[in-house]
Image: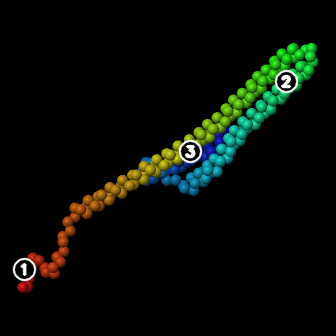
Amino acid sequence: MSSRIEQIIEEIEEYIDRDCKFQPLSTTKIIVNKEHLDELLRELRMKTPDEIKRYQKIIANRDAILADAQAKAEAMIEEAQVQTTELVSEHEIMQQAYAQANEIVTQATAQAQEIIDNATADANAIRIGAIQYTDDLLANAESIIGHTLDSYTTKYDGLINSLQECYDTVRSNRAELEIPEEDTDGYGSGDGNSQV
C-alpha cells in the first residue's frame, strides 16, 4: 500500500504528462494550471511531516522492544538467582546446588542474550526499513525538483542567449548605418551663392 506522499507525487506526474499541453511552437514548454499544481504541492508539504512522524514512532517502538526484552532477561536471571540461593542453603547438597545453579544462570543468561539479540535485530530492521522508505520518498521529491530546476535553468539560458543575439543584431545594424553630419556653420554648401 503506497503512502499519500507517493500518491501525490504520482498525481503531479500524471497531471504534467496527461493534462498539461505544450505551448504553441514549443516541444518542451508546457502550460500548467497554477492553482491545481499549488494545491498538490501544498498537500505534499502537509503530508511529509505526518509520514516522518509515523516512521519516528516505528523507530521509537524499538526502544520498547528492547526494554521488554531486558525486563524478561532480568526476571529470568533473578529467578535463577533465587533458585541458586535455595539450592545452596542446604549444606549437604551444596556442591550439587552450585553446579545446578551455574547451569541455570548460564541457560538464563544465554536465553536472555538471545531475546535481546533478536529484539535488537528486529528493531534495527524496522529502523532501517523506515529510514530507507523515507529516503526513497525524499529522493523522488529531489528528482522531481531537480528536473524542474534543470528545465527552467535551460529555458532561462535560452532566453538570455536569444536576447543577446537580438542585441548584437541591433548594434550591428546601427553600426552599418551612415548618418550624414549636419552643416553647423550656418552657410549652405554647394549652391555657389555665398556672400563676401
- State the residue lying farthest toward the bottom: 196
Identify the element where label 2 is drawn. Answer: helix
According to the image, label 2 marks what residue? 80
Q: Is residue 195 above or below residue 118?
A: below
Q: What residue do we see at 84% from left, 19% from top?
A: 101
Residue 148: image x %, image y %? 50, 48
Image check: 45 left or right of 167?
right
Identify the element where label 3 is drawn. Answer: helix
Are there few (<14), some (14-19), or many (20+) residues within 10 Å of tag 3?
some
According to the image, label 1 marks what residue? 192
Q: What residue do we see at 61% from left, 46% from top?
A: 8
Q: Type of residue at label 1?
A: Gly
Q: Nearer the viewer, residue 32 or 162?
A: 162
Image check: 193 left or right of 74?
left
Q: What residue do we see at 87% from left, 14% from top?
A: 96
Are there few (<14), some (14-19), or many (20+) residues within 10 Å of tag 1?
few
Mark 1 vs mark 3: which is more N-terminal?
Answer: 3
**C-alpha separation, residue under disc 1 versus residue under disc 3:** 84 Å
Q: To which quarter of the image does residue 68 belong?
A: top right
Residue 92: image x %, image y %? 92, 14
Asked if one can make out residue 91 in the rendered structure from this viewpoint, the answer is yes
According to the image, label 3 marks what residue? 141
Mark 2 vs mark 3: which is more N-terminal?
Answer: 2
Mark 1 vs mark 2: which is more N-terminal?
Answer: 2
Eye-nearest disc, 2 or 3: 2
Q: Quadrant of the C terminus?
A: bottom left
**C-alpha separation, residue under disc 2 versus residue under disc 3:** 55 Å
Q: Type of residue at label 3?
A: Ala
Identify the element where label 1 is drawn. Answer: loop
Residue 23: image x %, image y %? 45, 53
Asked if one can make out residue 14 in the rendered structure from this viewpoint, the answer is no
Q: What residue do we see at 56% from left, 52% from top?
A: 37
